[in-house]
């Protein structure tokens, strides 16, 4: 099930927008699947890749081994349009902007869209080179029931408020040049990898 993004897309001349959902997925859970399915539909994506990270710089504890994370992902995900990649781990990247720079450089004809949960947008300004990401990659946000006021008052939302599409324009995100972003609502899913790890102990 694991595929190299560049090989699988480049080999078929892929043209539909491709979503990228970065995370440690430690462990993967239904919330990740939910975000992916909503993004596929609401942003008219052809497919979405889960890109496994080595370590979330904003989290203290390290993730499970990649082998275990991938094993659990295969059990969880059923949709053929949700794919998986270890490109960030293989390139020893520590930050998302490094991954995105590589993919943009090597895949100029692929329309990438960075997919995020609402909680990540609230803390997006803490990411390394977050403004480079916002200026160079289209951003699709899937709300998961958090307080929308926190999103609207975030450093990212305030700085890029002029580049925000209405939720009714979500399928049009792919046609704009960055900076551009859009947030859509979805049903509330109260799951997180951190909580699941704690319950597993």
Image: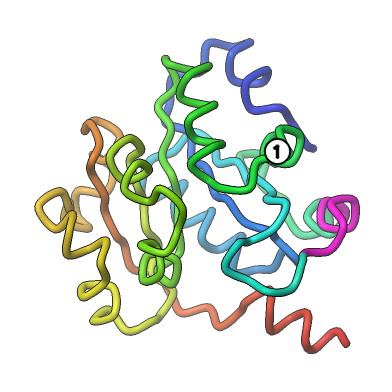
Residue shown at the point (39%, 62%) measured from the top left: 124
Quadrant containing the N terminus in the rendered view: top right
The vertical placement of 192 against 84, above or below, is: below
Q: Which residues are magenta?
A: 63-71
Instruction: Please identify the residue farthest to the left as the structure is shown.
Output: 162
* Relative vertical location of residue 50 with respect to residue 13 in this rendering, above or below: below
- In the displayed structure, would residue 3 be above or below residue 36? above
Q: Is residue 38 left or right of residue 26?
A: left
Say which of 136 and 21 sits in front. 136
Horizontal and vertical percent for residue 57? 60, 62
Residue 81 found in image quarter: top right
Q: Quadrant of the C terminus?
A: bottom right
Residue displayed at 38% across by 69% down: 143
Give residue 47's position: percent from left, percent from top. 54, 37
Residue at position x 23%, y 31% in the image: 177
Residue 180 in the image: state x and y as whole percent: 23, 44
Q: Label the magenta part by its dominant secondary structure.
A: helix
Which residue occupies the foreground of this view, 185 or 88?
A: 88
Mark 1: secondary structure: strand
Q: How is the image coloured?
A: rainbow
Dot 1 corresponds to which residue? 85
């Amino acid at each position: 099930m694991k595929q190299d993004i560049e090989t699988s897309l480049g080999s078929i001349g892929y043209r539909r927008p491709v979503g990228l959902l970065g995370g440690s997925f430690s462990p993967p859970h239904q919330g990740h699947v939910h975000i992916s399915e909503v993004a596929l539909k609401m942003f008219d994506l052809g497919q979405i890749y889960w890109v496994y990270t080595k370590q979330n710089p904003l989290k203290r504890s390290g993730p499970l081994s990649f082998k275990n994370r991938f094993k659990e992902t295969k059990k969880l995900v059923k949709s053929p349009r949700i794919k998986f990649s270890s490109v960030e781990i293989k390139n020893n990247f520590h930050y998302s902007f490094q991954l995105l720079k590589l993919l943009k450089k090597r895949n100029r004809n692929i329309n990438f869209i960075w997919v995020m949960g609402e909680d990540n947008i609230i803390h997006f300004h803490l990411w390394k080179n977050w403004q480079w990401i916002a200026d160079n990659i289209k951003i699709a946000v899937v709300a998961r029931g958090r307080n929308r006021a926190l999103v609207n008052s975030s450093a990212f939302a305030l700085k890029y408020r002029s580049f925000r599409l209405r939720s009714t324009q979500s399928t049009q995100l792919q046609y704009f040049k960055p900076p551009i972003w859009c947030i859509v609502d979805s049903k509330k899913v109260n799951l997180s990898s951190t909580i699941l790890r704690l319950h597993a102990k």
